[in-house]
Image (tube, rainbow, N blue to C red):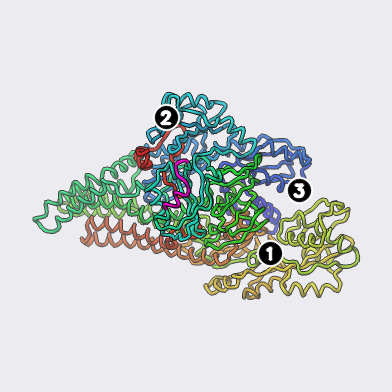
């Protein structure tokens, strides 16, 4: 499953093995082992192609990558095999047929690798995760399950990422297992859903229930249909009285599903769409939409302000039932609000009238009813997310905790004097209300033969009760019970930051139907590649594409972190997730699916970054594993041994031992690191900087040297042809331009595109009368090919010096050197036996911010170097413009030279955790086009510019735009992360040492000890989340869908959700309906 970049890197390593040092080889191989694909569940198809040649690589890549679902392509020339990595939507027969149409003899090969590549990644939200003490229990529950291959736990967001085989175990069954062990959880993302929707034999049947439904209908429907053979998923849309079922049409029919529901709804069940018909339509057009009763209308609110967002939600909830208005999308920069309403019950003009009564100036600009903008049926709800990642009804204090706190407060009054001493018995009631939930968790932990923080607190509380210290026992029960609530509140900002990133994904798109030409509002995930979509004002662009009609301003704040309108016109590329904020609609042709768009890749990378553990985090966890049992053992000696000496001494030391058990709890220490990472990763992601995990974030704060590639990194990578001349009398200008067009057409380098554009401007098109064969890339030099029987070369000075043709320039040598000294990149075209026949020069402007960035880095003590394959003249010209001394510039380097240079700077100590070592890391910053090996071997690889999307998997940090200033910001965040982690660890350890000291000085009580422990947890949490930017209501241009009702999650086979969660998710207005 290696990416194309990794394969090219391996090829380069093998090529350079004879000259590469062993240290560099070890570094590179260790990096490659860590690079893994960001998509789970991809398949591999192998096709045998007779007489496969290396010269056919570019053509095969271009043709096959245009097919839907294709991810990566590798050519095994010696075996005549094309290995294609794709998702389940790709058609293997279509791939083979495409190759046959190109003239290849293509034969599909059976590949057993697919049997081992059916894993999916599901995410579970586990409410009880407090610190790393719960991680061993969760791992012990999940890892032994057959079909589970990997488990990652994110303490800060309380998310458990599970890689599993859905054929053996589903996400719901994993959640059931956790629930049976006392961990309240819900499936946040079911990885199987992505497979079942696209399965060639699974269709979706839609059934209408012709009466009003309520939440009481959900459980009977799920139980009745969930255990039928062939049923994959069941969803119930209560507000529209619709049941949809995903099922294998070969095992169970729509009529059978209808008959199963008849006993519950006699004569009231009708099949609106048969699953078999859905499959047929999906296969023929690639586009299938089940219409709902709702339409989308657009309102312009001229005085819309951030504080109005809450007012809009309150007004809509107070005045409309979910059956009338189900959601709205506010967008502050354009002052547009889109509403999803049922036109048969509520008109768009009525909504505007209501807002005007509230003081908001509203005008209907698009009436969805009149323009037939019918919204698709909401089917795949997924698990609801409230307040970041915490269900609202579970985010407040539980009644038992409130009562425990109330009686604890009464027991504390016993300290006022002897006449109030009887109030200490209120502590018994406090323990009675606060301790049972903790004791239940402790009992289950002991059943698993483990010992965690719950067990410690129960031990302390029982010990205090036996000693008659009822108020102290109440303090332990109450403070430990309330600590989870305090921590959850403190972490809510970090969770909201991650949730806001996930909400960037588009919900639907206005698609031109490929057969009828009508505009259909389709779920974004079902928009096929190559579709034409209409993007009106305020609409999100569903997927990456090219503008084919219209000109408007687009908000790309999710990429750059700031609302800076970008004008998009015909032939400009647009990113999925960006928003049209102009007054003109755009027609966009999609070039990828929603899952492969920029915003989806960003979301996947952010989610994946949360599962990567850093050396510091592992160090802290390992310390806690040793520290806690040692301290508990010491406490056990203190609690038991003194009783053999005297009762009075035993009582005194028993109380001290219980205090020591309290400080043995590792929560404050273990949560100090992940919460800081979560805040840092969210802060950078909101600025369009994707950092792959805490280790990379730490490394950013420990960078000693930064190596910049020149072209496309320090410069804009936008070449302009300044000189183009013929040399000698062998060819006319027309003939020289034809040769240049042929040679540069297959290349993907930005310079090639500039040359072809310049040739076309002179009226020279693709010269079909000339025949080119054996087109070969010469790494670091140029290209060569046979054209009409002559060997033609196009490349740089290094190539022609090697070919001994450079002297044929004659008198032009001085002019060429002059162009180079002024910063131009000079190239030549030559023919074997004739010498150089043409010369050209292109210029590339330095980025506006490059000079300030380099100066800022050098003033901060960071050593800055520049590597380039260009000549000295061009390199020194750029260095002069950015104030970089010439001794820090290295020019005329091949890709493997860059690899050797970066490898020689890396120190072995850099592998240690960044919080424990001084600055020693080496960062490589490049565009990812031809410097992937250097990005891979560096301690920190940062990709930006045109190649950033391709280099996402190879790099540790990715800039979603081309602003170098974000490099400085990311390093500042990295430094703050390292400093914050050091502060948190130091604070936790000092607090524990102080408690120990005061305990042996007889100045400590259980109340003060537990208060100190909870206080330190709160302090390290608040210290960690300070890295997040200041909260702003709907910051930037984000358009977030605000649903006015709760949708129920589809389930597979059975519903694992407990009663508490069902009640928490009920719509409030169903009884009124």
Residue occupied by mark 3 = 54
Residue occupied by mark 1 = 718
- At label 1, counting other C-alpha atoms closer than 10 Å, the crowd grade (few under 14, some 14-19, many 20 or more) is some
Q: Is residue 318 left or right of residue 799?
A: left
What residue appears at the point 80 percent right and 74 percent down from the top-left corner? Answer: 815
Residue occupied by mark 2 = 223
Find out whether residue 353 is within the magenta segment.
yes
Give the mark, 3 or 1, whose residue is nearer the N terminus.
Answer: 3
> Which part of the image, by quadrant, shows the C terminus?
top left
Above or below for 765 versus 67: below
Residue 209 drawn at (x, y percent) = 45, 31
User: What secondary structure is marked by label 3?
Assistant: helix
| Camera-nearest residue between 878 and 734 | 734
Magenta segment range?
344-354
Find out whether residue 607 is within the magenta segment.
no
User: What secondary structure is marked by label 2?
Assistant: helix
What residue appears at the point 76 percent right and 60 percent down from the top-left corner? Answer: 757
Gap between marks 3 and 1 measured at Cα: 29 Å
Give the mark, 3 or 2, whose residue is nearer the N terminus.
Answer: 3
């Amino acid at each position: 499953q290696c990416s194309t970049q990794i394969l090219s890197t391996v090829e380069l390593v093998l090529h350079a093995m004879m000259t590469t040092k062993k240290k560099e080889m070890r570094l590179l191989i260790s990096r490659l082992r860590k690079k893994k694909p960001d998509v789970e569940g991809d398949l591999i198809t192998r096709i045998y192609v007779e007489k496969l040649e290396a010269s056919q690589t570019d053509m095969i890549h271009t043709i096959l990558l245009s097919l839907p679902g294709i991810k990566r392509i590798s050519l095994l020339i010696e075996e005549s095999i094309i290995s294609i990595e794709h998702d389940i939507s790709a058609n293997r027969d279509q791939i083979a047929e495409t190759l046959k149409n190109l003239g290849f003899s293509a034969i599909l090969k059976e590949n057993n690798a697919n049997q081992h590549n059916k894993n999916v990644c599901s995410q579970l939200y586990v409410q009880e995760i407090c610190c790393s003490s719960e991680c061993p229990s969760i791992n012990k529950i999940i890892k032994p399950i057959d079909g589970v291959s990997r488990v990652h736990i994110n303490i800060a967001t309380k998310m458990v990422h599970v890689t599993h085989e859905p054929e053996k175990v589903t996400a719901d069954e994993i959640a059931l297992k956790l629930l049976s062990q006392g961990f309240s959880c819900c499936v946040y993302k079911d990885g199987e859903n992505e497979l079942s929707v696209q399965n060639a034999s699974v269709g979706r049947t839609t059934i209408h229930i012709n009466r009003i439904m309520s939440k009481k209908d959900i459980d009977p429907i799920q139980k009745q249909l969930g255990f039928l053979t062939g049923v994959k998923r069941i969803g119930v849309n209560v507000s529209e009285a619709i049941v949809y079922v995903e099922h294998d049409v070969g095992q169970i029919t729509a009529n059978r599903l209808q008959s199963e529901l008849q006993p519950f709804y006699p004569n009231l069940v009708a099949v609106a769409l048969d699953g078999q018909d859905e499959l047929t339509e999906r296969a023929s057009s690639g586009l299938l939409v089940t219409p709902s009763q709702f339409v989308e209308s657009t309102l312009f609110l001229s005085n819309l302000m951030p504080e109005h967002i809450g007012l809009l939600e309150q007004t809509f909830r107070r005045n409309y039932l979910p059956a009338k208005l189900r959601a709205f999308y506010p967008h502050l920069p354009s002052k547009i609000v889109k509403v999803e309403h049922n036109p048969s019950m509520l008109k768009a003009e009525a909504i505007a009238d209501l807002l005007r009564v509230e003081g908001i100036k509203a005008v209907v600009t698009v009436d969805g009813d009149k323009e037939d903008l019918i919204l698709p049926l909401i089917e795949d709800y997924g698990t609801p997310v409230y307040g970041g990642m915490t269900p609202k009804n579970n985010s407040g204090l539980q009644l038992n905790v409130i009562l425990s706190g109330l009686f604890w407060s009464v027991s504390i009054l016993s300290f006022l004097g002897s006449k109030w001493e009887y109030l200490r018995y209120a502590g018994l009631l406090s323990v009675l209300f606060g301790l049972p939930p903790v004791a239940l968790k402790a009992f289950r932990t002991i059943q698993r033969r483990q010992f965690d923080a719950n067990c410690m607190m129960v031990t302390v509380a029982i010990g205090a009760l036996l000693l008659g210290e009822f108020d102290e026992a109440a303090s332990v029960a109450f403070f430990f019970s309330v600590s989870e609530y305090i921590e959850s509140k403190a972490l809510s900002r970090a969770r909201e930051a991650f949730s806001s990133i996930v909400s960037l994904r588009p919900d639907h798109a206005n698609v031109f139907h490929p057969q009828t030409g009508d505009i259909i509002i389709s779920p974004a995930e079902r928009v096929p590649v190559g579709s034409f979509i209409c993007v009106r004002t305020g609409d999100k662009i569903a997927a990456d594409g090219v503008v084919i009609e219209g000109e408007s301003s687009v908000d790309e704040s999710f990429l750059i972190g700031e609302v800076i309108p970008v004008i998009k016109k015909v032939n400009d590329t647009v990113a999925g997730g960006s928003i049209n904020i102009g007054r003109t609609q755009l027609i966009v042709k999609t070039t990828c699916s929603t899952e492969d768009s920029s915003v989806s890749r960003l979301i996947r990378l952010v989610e994946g970054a949360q599962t990567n553990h850093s050396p510091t985090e592992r160090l802290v966890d390992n310390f806690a594993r040793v520290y806690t049992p040692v301290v508990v053992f010491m406490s056990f000696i203190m609690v038991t041994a003194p009783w053999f000496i005297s009762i009075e001494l035993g009582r005194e030391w028993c109380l001290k031992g219980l205090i020591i058990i309290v400080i043995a709890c590792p929560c404050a220490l273990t949560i100090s690191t992940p919460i800081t990472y979560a805040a840092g990763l969210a802060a950078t992601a909101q600025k369009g900087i994707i950092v792959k995990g805490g280790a990379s974030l730490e490394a950013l704060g420990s960078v000693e040297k930064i190596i910049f590639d020149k072209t496309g990194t320090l410069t804009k990578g936008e070449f302009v042809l300044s000189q183009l001349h013929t040399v000698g009398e062998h060819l006319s200008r027309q003939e020289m331009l034809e040769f240049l067009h042929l040679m540069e057409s297959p290349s993907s380098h930005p310079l090639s595109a500039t040359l072809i554009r310049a040739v076309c401007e002179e009226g020279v098109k693709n010269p079909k009368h000339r025949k080119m064969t054996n087109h070969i890339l010469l790494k670091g030099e140029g290209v060569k090919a046979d054209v009409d029987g002559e060997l033609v070369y196009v490349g740089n000075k290094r190539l022609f010096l090697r070919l001994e043709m450079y002297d044929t320039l004659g008198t032009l040598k001085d002019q060429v050197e002059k162009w180079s000294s002024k910063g131009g990149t000079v190239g030549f075209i030559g023919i074997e036996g004739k010498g150089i026949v043409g010369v050209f020069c292109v210029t590339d402007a330095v980025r506006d911010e490059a000079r300030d960035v380099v100066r800022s880095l050098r003033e901060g003590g960071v050593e800055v170097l520049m590597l380039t394959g260009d000549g000295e003249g061009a390199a020194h010209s750029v260095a002069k413009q950015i104030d970089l001394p010439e001794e820090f510039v290295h020019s005329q380097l091949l890709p493997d030279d860059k690899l050797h240079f970066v490898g020689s700077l890396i120190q072995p100590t850099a592998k240690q955790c960044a919080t424990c070592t001084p600055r020693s890391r080496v960062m490589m910053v490049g565009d990812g086009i031809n410097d992937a090996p250097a990005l891979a071997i560096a301690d920190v690889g940062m990709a930006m510019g045109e190649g950033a999307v391709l280099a996402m998997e190879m790099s540790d940090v990715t800039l979603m735009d081309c602003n170098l200033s974000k490099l400085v910001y990311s390093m500042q965040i990295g430094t703050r992360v390292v400093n914050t982690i050091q502060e948190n660890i130091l604070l936790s350890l000092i607090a524990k040492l102080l408690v120990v000291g005061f305990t042996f000085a007889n100045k400590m009580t259980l109340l003060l000890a537990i208060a100190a422990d909870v206080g330190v947890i709160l302090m390290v949490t608040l210290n960690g989340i300070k890295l997040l930017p200041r909260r702003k209501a709907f910051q930037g241009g984000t358009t977030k869908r605000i649903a006015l009702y709760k949708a129920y999650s589809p389930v597979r086979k059975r519903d694992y959700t407990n009663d508490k969660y069902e009640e928490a998710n009920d719509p409030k207005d169903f009884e009124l309906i």
